[in-house]
Amino acid sequence: MAELKNDLLLRALLREKVERTPLWIMRQAGRYLPEYREVRAQAGDFMSLCRNAELACEVTMQPLRRYKLDAAILFSDILTVPDAMGLGLYFAAGEGPKFERPLRTAADIKKLVLPDVADELGYVFNAVRTIRRELDGQVPLIGFAGSPWTVGTYMVEGGSSREFSHIKGLAAEDPAALSTLLDTVATTTTDYLNAQIAAGAQAVMIFDTWGAALERDDYRRFSLASMQKIVDGLTRENEGRRVPVTLFTKGAGPMLADMVGTGCDALGVDWTTTLSQAREYVQDKVALQGNLDPATLRESHEAIRQGVADTLESYGTGPGHVFNLGHGITPDIDPDNLGVLVDAVHELSPQYHS
Ligand code: CP3
């Protein structure tokens, strides 16, 4: 395997000294890039793109050709896991993800079987190997999965949701059934992430997009506990290096303090918490990743530079910051505006590392 030429991300995630703040962008491969839309059209639909290792590799590489980014992220989706469990994932035009067979009752949950990850998700590990070969050590590759709670919301609601009425109903009426579901997803996700690491993922991230829809006690009981199970079972070293683990609960706020105890290396932060406040919550025990509001990328070049400056200043000096947005980049963004952001991080961040 080619030697890693740029390991800023891996060092920053472990709070080691760096010369400047590394950066990558959530959803950096995506619809805001015309070259992505072209390959996506060629593939036919989103899942066909995910299942084709060559095309998944191509769209993973696209943002790295345009911008000086410090990481690649595997092109895939968090919902490949429930798809592998037999729920039948599909993307209805303009409606986001949906399942043919959502889980509505305790009986549906009992019938769930642990999938053979190597069989059902082999296409993901092929993509990881293909991307690593193509990267040739340029930057590290991030693997990822969804948190059991977040993935569970889609499994029980049958698709995207605002109110989470079915899964919250299940939490109230049959919490044991919900725990069974979350355990099953956690076990599968642990195997899934370990297989990504074995295939070449050099850092992993768990996306908990909907954890903050829960009140704090329920967050701890359902979302955080199931992420803890995954962290406990992860391979933490591979190819002679530590494999850093990042947890990202969008909107976590003060719950960031609870998340440190999982033994993760880093936490993602969205824009509703300042990085200086987040740093207080975590007492510098873990690295922080974030947190510019993606909406800033719709503003002027000057406003984008100012947003970058404010984000760096809010974290302040010292190691342990990975620059990112506070959530994924949206499809309406002008790709040139992301270039302004990337250049500003390169230019303005060295002064925070002496
Ligand atoms: O960051 C990256 O570049 C890696 C790829 C990635 C995708 N999805 C590709 C994708 C990652 C890390 C995800 C994670 C994901 N998927 C999350 C958690 C992170 C978050 O954004 O909160 C969630 C909740 C999902 C579920 C999901 N997948 C939704 C809700 C959608 C539809 C979104 C929409 O705007 O239509 C997807 C589809 C999806 N996953 C797309 C991409 C690039 C768009 C599909 C397309 O090309 O039509």
Image: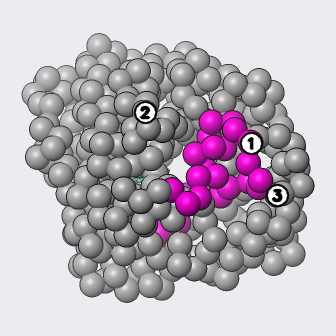
Q: Residue at x 29, y 64 (%)?
A: 130
Which label lies toward us, 1 or 3?
A: 1
Under mark 1, the amino acid is Lys
Nearest to N terminus: mark 2 or mark 1? 1
| C-alpha separation, residue under disc 1 versus residue under disc 3 | 13 Å
Q: Residue at x 74, y 42 (%)?
A: 17
**Residue beneath disc 1:** 17
Secondary structure under the numbered disc 2 in the rendered image = strand
Please state the total of marks drawn on the protein image.
3
Q: Is 340 located above or below residue 251 in the figure? A: below
Q: Is 71 located above or below residue 32 in the figure? A: above
**Residue beneath disc 3:** 349
Whether the magenta-drawn stretch holds residue 23 is answered as: yes
Residue neighbourhood size for the residue with mark 2, other residues' Cα within 10 Å, grouped as few (<14), some (14–19), many (≥20): some
Horizontally, residue 309 falls left or right of residue 9, namely right
Q: Residue at x 22, y 69 (%)?
A: 52
Q: Which of these two is toward me, 325 or 241?
A: 241
Q: Which of these two is toward me, 217 or 353?
A: 353
Horizontally, residue 108 falls left or right of residue 320, namely left
Under mark 3, the amino acid is Ser
Whether the magenta-drawn stretch holds residue 322 is answered as: no
Horizontally, residue 31 falls left or right of residue 192, namely right
**Residue beneath disc 2:** 237
Q: Is mark 2 within 8 Å of ligand 1?
A: no
Residue neighbourhood size for the residue with mark 1, other residues' Cα within 10 Å, grouped as few (<14), some (14–19), many (≥20): some
- Whether residues under marks 1 and 3 lie with C-beta atoms below 8 angstroms apart, the answer is no
Q: Which of these two is toward me, 2 or 258?
A: 2
Q: Which stretch did the figure color magenta?
A: 4-29
Secondary structure under the numbered disc 3 in the rendered image = loop
Secondary structure under the numbered disc 1 in the rendered image = loop
Q: Quadrant of residue 48?
A: bottom left
Q: Is 204 located above or below residue 110 in the figure? A: below
